[in-house]
Image (cartoon, grey):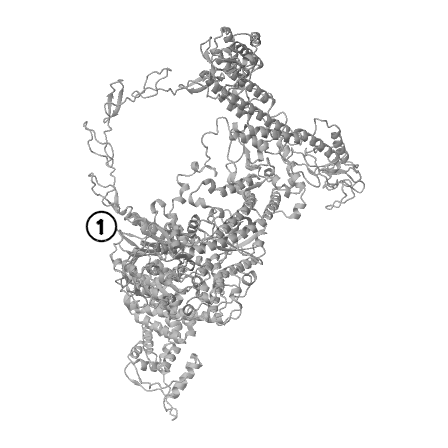
Amino acid sequence: MEMVGGPQVAPELDRRGEAAGRQHPEAERHQRPNRARHGDNFNRREEGMGRDDGDEEAEGVTEPKQIIPRVGYNKLQDWMQRDPDDLLTFITIERSGFPHALEDMPMMKKLDFMGGLLAVIARALMSTANPRAVILLLNKIRSSRFLDHGLPDYLTAMQMVSSAARFRGFRQPIKDMLALMKHLMTSFPGNIQRLLPTIIMADYTIRALRQNTTVVDAEIERSLEEVNNIREDLMNREKARKAAASVEIGQDNGEMPQAHEDHQPPNDFREMTIFPDVQQDILTRAKPFLRPNKTRGGYDDTGHYLDVQFRLLREDFIQPLRKGIHEYLDLQRADGRNVRLTDIRVYHDVSILMPICTHSGIQYRIRFDVSRMKHINWRYSKRLIFGSLLCLSKDEFNTIFIATVSDRKPELLQDGYLQVRFEVDPDAVRRIQPDERFVMVETSAYFEAYRHVLTALQTMGDDDIPFRNNIIACNPQVNPPRYLFTAAEPTYNIQPLIDGGHHRGRGRNQGRAQRLNASDDDSDEDYAVTPYSVLPILQADRWPSAETLRLDDSQLRAIRAALTRELTIIQGPPGTGKTYIGLKIVEALHVNRGVWNPNDNRNDNSPILVVCYTNHALDQFLEGIHGFMKTGIVRVGGRSKNEKMKGFLLAELRRKLRDMKTVPRHIFQARMDMRHEMEKWQVVIEKTAAMIDGTERGLLHEEVLQDFMAPEHYESLTQRVHPLDEETDHGIFSNRTSRYGPSCLPLWLGLDDMLYREEIPPGGGGGGVEVNPEDPEAPAAAAAPAGAGEDAANRIEIEDDVAAIEDDRRIAELEDDEVEPRRRRGGDEADVDQEEMRRIRFRDQANQRLVLDIDNIPDVGGGEWQVQRGGRKRRRQRLQQELRSTDTAREEEVDRIGNVWTLDEKERWRLYRYWMGLYRNDLKDNVLECELQFQIAADRLKEILEQEDRAIMQAMTVIGMTTTGAARYKNALRQIRPKIVIVEEAAEVLEAQVITTLSAGCEHLVLIGDHKQLRPSANVFRLAEDYGLKYSLFERLVNNDIPHETLRNQHRMRPEIADLVRIIYDDLSDHVSVTRYDDVRGVGANLFLVNHNEEELKDEELKSVSNIHEASFVVALCRYLTLQGYHPSQITILTPYTGQMFLFKRLMPKEQFDGVRVCPVDNYQGEENDIVLLSLVRSNTQGKIGFVKDDNRACVAMSRAKKGFYLIGNFDHLARHSDLWSKITQKARQMGKFGNSLRLCCQNHPDEARIEVRSARDFEQAPEGGCLRPCGFRLKCGHACERVCHSYDREHENYRCQKPCVKTICPNGHRCRKQCQEPCGDCKQLVDRVMPGCGHRQRVPCSVPPDFKCQAECNHLLVCRHLCQNKCGEEHTRTCMVRVQKALGCGHSASVTCHEGSTEDVRCSERCAKLLDCGHRCPGDCGSCFQGRLHAPCRSDCGRTVVCGHKCAEPCTRNCPPCARKCENRCVHSRCPRECGRPCEPCREPCQWRCEHFACTMLCHQPCDRARCDRPCRRVIPRCGHPCIGLCGERCPDKCRVCHRDEVTEVFFGTEDEDDARFVQLEDCGHIFEVSGLDRWMDMAADRRSAVDIQMKQCPKCKTTIRRNLRYGTVINSILNDIERVKGLILGDRTRNARKRREMQTKLRALSSSLTDQQEKYFKDRLDGQDLTVEEVACVENALNFAARIVEWKTQLDADVRASGDGDVSGKLQALNAEAGPLLSWFLRQRTRFSEQELREARWEFSRFVLLAKCVQVEGRLNRCPNPKVTAAVRRRFEAALRPLRSGQPLTESLEAEAKLAANEVVQLIGGLGISEEERQKIVTAMGMSKGHWFKCPQGHIYAIGECGGAMEESDCPECGSRVGGTHHRLLESNALASEMDGATAPAYNARNLPDPGLIRRLQFE
């Protein structure tokens, strides 16, 4: 390279001012080789310069060699005096010595020399005359040791200096160095990697100097920012260049995919699958095709733009999954068990248990292994939150199932249960069996949001993206909205904005919306015509001023731009009122709705679409709109926590529309049809799901598993139980809720140690609970300290990330809210909970299949088998682990198992899980079609609801959605075509999410946000950084110079807080209102940074950090501020880390901090509070500060406080690693707001008490918010405040003085004895008084009046001779409450209160000592046994063995009822499915007993027609090769004569040890016997069997019933036939039983009106059940007959009571009638039969009841009878006979005969005749009248009526004077037919008013 046209080099002056001549060219040539180390290019440049230097070389003149002088500090000073152009030319030549100075390391060790060198370079670089010389100089520097070593050493030395004077000398060198760095990077951008270490060192040094000195000024700050910006830009370019140059696809080692910015995509992105493909996306090692987001410049076309957005967004959720699975598989191959994966979480032993029906379709409950996750707090863990993407595989991810988390319950997650929705291949998912096991990986990507956005992007075309000229091409020209061109001169009414009122005018198409969400305060406002009510909107000069609109200039510009530009971007720094301006824009558009929405047709209505990033922001914005728009708003999304928005939710509007019955008929009908269809299938699915769920909760009964067991396994399992039953209770393995009875599975599985019997001792068990302090299961109330269990509930609520993330992820669910309409509206609980009750019923039915329920293991109780309390939790966990274990027996293993009792416990559990797996698979297979049909109906319902929702949204004025919700409703929005879209928080939203909210109908887009606050969040950091995914559409358009407006005036932060924010926003100004804030009380500064160096702690599970020092300090400061009088709601605690938030929760009790908001920084954007406390957490020695370094996040954190802002952190650490925090720290130092301690100022002693707090403990110096001095405030009572100095209640308005009161309060001079704070009241001094009435001496308070009632005990004796229980001054006791013993009618006594005269209602509880007929003692008491008349049934165990071989499970009975256990009869073909007591259906398959010599030709159930074959078996035992010891055609025994000689030759029958002995093995138990002995045993038993000894034959050794041995099939079948005949006898003739049942049902219908519902149900349940046995029929018939007779007599007694004219008789009959109820209840007790004793006693009791009723009536007539023949002796005999009936003693034959005899004697005498029967017959014959002419007066005196028998006149009875007869053929009502005279049943003349003629006939006693 040659120098061109440079000036002549001036002679150099040495330090003495002498001129040094020009060096000869020849000398230069001699010296050049010494500089060869600088490279060939350098030499060539020097040679070129030499040739241009003059004519000396041409003339051949040779000059002597010249030594180049060493450059020192003085020479550098001299050079600084030169002109920049001259200096540049000079120092670039070799002889100047400058190049040597750049290599002189000893000199560069001197700080002054380095400063001078930098000054020379900077001055030379100021030259503008010779650019080439500048490049030459920079090149020399670039390749010198000065850059590589000199500058880094110099920067390091700067940090070591301690002199303030020396520090000041560094300011200019730093500036010079930064200028040099800018020139080097600008001139040599490709050499950035070499410059990078020096730049980083400079950045670090400047931050350190900023922290500790005042060297760094604004100019340095600007220069450093420029250097860093250039560096970042060059680094990004370098990354892009390397990515573009990469051809090979890197391995999955964290490298980013290849950037193909200039390449065409390999395929159409619209054809790509949304879900990851296992081969193309997961297992591939090829990098996907990606192009970066163009942050500068436009896209080629719409296809290019959409392709970039789609591929980047899809890769953002797929890459973590791909990378994580690759890492997992690599680690699996390398056995990296303890290596933590970074991108995914792995869950093992995942099983898909059962389907769950939801309104959106079929979801599934899965279970995963949580044995190694006990440390996880699922409530706060970010694992498995709603929407997380899951990938399941069982073949190392060669095939996968994609699912998302659909429901998350922490209490279920801790047990490993989760609800998911599978996203692809539903048919394959439905066929997954519950016993299949998967590995599941989770990525935190919220797939739901990706799915909707990606789907929307694929369906978008060119016309779907409005403003393509700006958004895609990045053209800065922005036009007005198209709708403004529809009018010649569009005008707006902006008068409401000026007035400050809210226009509530209704738009043209808002009528339907008004009806949907109408409010009482809706009204229209009319505005007078003003210049601003018809404003030409596009004429800027016609707009009112900012003052007129009450806005600042930037706000005015923003509003004007928003109303006049079709694409408006409004940047709002913190506190500038972005939301306020957004609401003003919406209000203006609403008022002028007719301009942009002129169509009256509601179907063409175009609402405003408001989109926000979060639900919280959406609620806030819509609430602001609601201030001026009371109707026409719909909030789409079901997760609103804002009460004001509840009425605008889409679901609520949908409900209102349905209530108004305005839903289109076709939608309504289709929705109802689908809902009914879903419910139909849901019932089936839920029932099956409950059964599957039951297998997780407990042990299934073997009867449930029987169909899935091999027959021999079931037989061997169940046969072992019966011997145990002889010694133990049959309930030992019985679940109270099981309907299958006892089970042997717990014993078989080794769970018998979980159970034991505990008898409650007499008198025990009813009191308190005895607690063992070491018992882990002890009751919490007794064992736990007070309040221990309330710790979690007593902590404040924090806005944890999990809740916030889930809340924002749950977008609008298309639920059918008619499924539970009453639940939301407080309807009838019976209707509300129908579905829940159905689930409970299904769960109960599933529980009935369990023999042991984990969740319902019983507590300790009397007489039951119960779980031992001490180790119950541990044993429950053991059972749960066994049930959930995946170690299952294989099918081939199961086939080899014979007797299941020979297995060890582990193998038994493996076998049980095999059976359980078959059972669950069978259940799952049964509902496959149901799942499919349910999902089809759910999908159809979803479509119907979308139609309904679209119609609702179309009718609105404003639609509010989140970005995810907008993507979800993309199809609906395309049809609605909103013209105006307003996006709030637009800078925080991914560009693709904004684009998908737009439609072809959009004519106006307003983006409001701030790209300097939070940016969009991406899953993959490098996609965000290297591919521009972090840039929002908002920021991209701003960067591309699309016109935007920035708000300048902040209204939030006090100026000193805003000063920190101005580091980011240098032109941010303060509104005057923020200068008027009061200072924060009790603190020395309104803003302060508290510095510390305490280490942070890391939480691996939360992947977060915490800092206990900061947390405790912030909590103490928060408490201190509340003591200053600040309400907790005025304080917010912010932190960037979840771990720190949970630490705050642990340290902040709710009762003290309730109302303080603890929130992540990211969740607090857009919000503010008076005081903000910020904990920055990071403090470590690794130099890590995490995302605290993020400037955008820091911007949010710094700008939330209004009045007070306090930060705590290791700011030295932060400043070293963040330029922004370095500036913040320096700024705080300059303001005096930085230090290691915060000063607290006592409000009461401001000049005396100042406290410096460094830690939480220091706040103890201000325990009550003041200081440690006594308060000393003089109270109104004259006392001094005793508290320590306190900042609250400074005027002591609420203070309560605790000192004793000194006031005199009565004339006696007594002083008040209360505390000063309490009202004095009356004098309470006790004094002695003598009561004037009774003379008692009483000690009473002084203030008690003289008429005080004496409080001494009363000594007055009552009539009963007991003392009065009242006080002396009170009225005497009227009802004596002393308990006394009184005799009962039964002869026993009972304790009753004295005033109770009658004991008729007292039930005797004396134990009945009667021996029943069965020989057992009666279990009842005297009252329940009706005083011995009707004894309680015997409850003793029967204990007998029934014909089937089982033990009778019923209580003591003569004839045992049919056995209710599962029938165990089976053959080689099948098994009987019925209950044991029911007849078995005989097997009609051909008999299988055959060998090569004989074959049976009979059916299986018939006796065989062949002989037994006794020839030896010729087979060989496979295991050992020895000959079989069995017989031909029989099953080979599993024992060998050689291998098991001792067992085989064990003598039992006596012939076992013979060499040719042959053996038979019993299949039921496995024992082997010598065949001749066993044959004799079986045949002998058969021959000796009698009719009363019908029993199945049993194994001679173990007593196992022999049921299925073919050799003895004839014997077995013969016995079975006998048993079947016995069963038939027990059950009876089915035809007869059925006829009896029908007859009883007819009889019951006739009686139903006289029975209660419960009594009627008793009979219906018995008659509607299964086939009844003979005894059951008899039992029901007896009960029904007795009930009919009792009802009949009750009816008759009621009639007799009404007919009786005697009050005494009526009362006795009513009392007797009341006895019928208990008697009937006794008959209706639950029983299977009436014992003979019960029937006998029932007949006697009924006879006593009837006889007593008759005698009562006779007694009444006897008392009124005047017949002289009724003598006193007759009366005594009658009363003596009646007395035993009334006493309640049991009736006997003698008592009955005596009573009947006495009663008949009386009846004969009181018939009204006073004559004998013989005399009566003679009189009747003599009168010669037909029947019906004889009547009697009211006193029973007989008279006759002749002729027709009808009464025609009245007269007086000659005996008693009563009126007799009647008129007009009508007998007097007091007279009656005397049927006792002639036996007539009706009068001769039948009058309707005659009483019952059968009265006397009923009184006749047989």
1485 sits left or right of 1172 in the view? right
Residue 1733 drawn at (x, y percent):
59, 21
Count the marks: how many? 1
173 to 628, vertically: above or below? below
Query: Which is nearer the eye, 877 or 1614?
Result: 1614
**Is residue 170 visible in the rendered structure shown here?**
no
Find disc 1 in the rendering and name its residue: 1248
Q: Secondary structure at mark 1?
A: loop
**Residue 1566, picture quadrant:** top right
User: Residue type at mark 1?
Assistant: Glu
1457 to 1115, vertically: above or below? above
Residue 720 drawn at (x, y percent):
64, 36
1625 sits left or right of 533 in the view? right
Query: Which is nearer the eye, 280 or 538?
Result: 538
At horizontal 74% and vertical 44% (from top left) the residue drawn is 1517
1283 to 1142, vertically: above or below? above
Query: Which is nearer the eye, 531 or 1434?
Result: 531
Q: Quadrant of the C terminus?
A: top right
Query: Which is nearer the eye, 1412 or 215?
Result: 1412
Residue 153 drawn at (x, y percent):
37, 69
Residue 583 drawn at (x, y percent):
34, 58
